[in-house]
């Protein structure tokens, strides 16, 4: 049942129920796959942004845009001398990713940065260079400071701040995963899925 996947500390009442997924499969004529697919249903969450003035956002809270709340040793990332735009920070105590995968850390902050500069997007090496975005993790959350972006970033490259609300859900694999893992091989069934 869904409680087994989520653990005893999470209330699954507002979530799509396990049986709801089973009903959807049956209505699509795919009920015969339930015994295989029920083990592929995993806990997950999605994020809902709420535009919020940065002054009203607690230091270290999960957010999109604004200025990152980082440890004092943090160095702002760049790509080929172009400073990256701060996209988001996720406080892992607010978004328990370890419920999805126990190997993920339960505490700390993930930071996301990206080169948001249309002048370099069309360089030949931009698309092929995997270093044009950065995910940074720190376990440190006690000595954070709100860091201003580098002066080289234009106003368009600094995103407005938004708090993030967590919504829990059950997730199912896509048809490509099912086919690649031989969980569903019939093409007509894959198309209906």
Image (cartoon, rainbow, N blue to C red):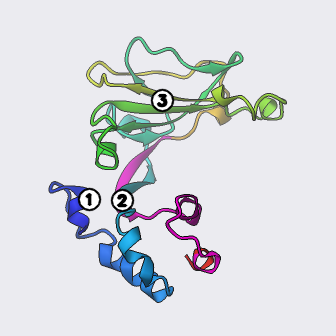
Rendering coords of residue 51 (x, y %): 46, 49
Q: Secondary structure at mark 3?
A: loop
Indicate whether residue 101 is drawn in magenta: no
The answer to whether residue 17 is seen in the rendering is no
- Residue tagged 2: 42
Which of the 4 image quadrants contains residue 5? bottom left
Q: CA distance from mark 1 to mark 2?
A: 7 Å
Indicate whether residue 188 is drawn in magenta: yes
Q: Earlier in the sequence, mark 1 or mark 2?
A: 1
- Could you tell me which residue is drawn at 27 percent across and 37 percent down? 106
- Could you tell me which residue is drawn at 54 percent across and 59 percent down? 177
Q: CA distance from mark 3 to mark 2?
A: 33 Å
- Residue tagged 3: 67
- Could you tell me which residue is drawn at 41 percent across and 27 percent down? 137
Which portion, as a residue range, is magenta? 161-189
- Residue tagged 1: 5
Q: Is residue 1 above or below residue 126?
A: below
């Amino acid at each position: 049942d869904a409680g087994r996947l989520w653990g005893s500390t999470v209330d699954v009442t507002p979530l799509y129920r396990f049986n709801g997924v089973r009903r959807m499969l049956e209505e699509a004529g795919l009920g015969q796959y339930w015994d295989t697919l029920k083990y592929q249903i995993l806990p997950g969450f999605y994020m809902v942004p709420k535009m919020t003035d940065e002054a009203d956002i607690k230091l270290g809270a999960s957010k999109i845009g604004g200025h990152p709340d980082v440890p004092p040793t943090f160095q702002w990332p760049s790509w080929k001398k172009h400073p990256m735009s701060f996209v988001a920070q996720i406080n892992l105590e607010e978004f328990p990713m370890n419920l999805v995968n126990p190997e993920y850390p339960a505490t700390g902050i993930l930071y996301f940065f990206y080169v948001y500069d249309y002048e370099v997007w069309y360089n030949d090496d931009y698309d092929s260079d995997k270093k044009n975005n950065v995910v940074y993790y720190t376990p440190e959350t006690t000595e954070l400071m709100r860091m201003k972006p580098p002066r080289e970033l234009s106003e368009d490259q600094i995103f407005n701040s938004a708090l993030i609300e967590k919504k829990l859900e059950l997730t199912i694999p896509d048809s490509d995963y099912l086919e690649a893992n031989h969980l569903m091989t019939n093409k007509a069934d894959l198309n209906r899925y």
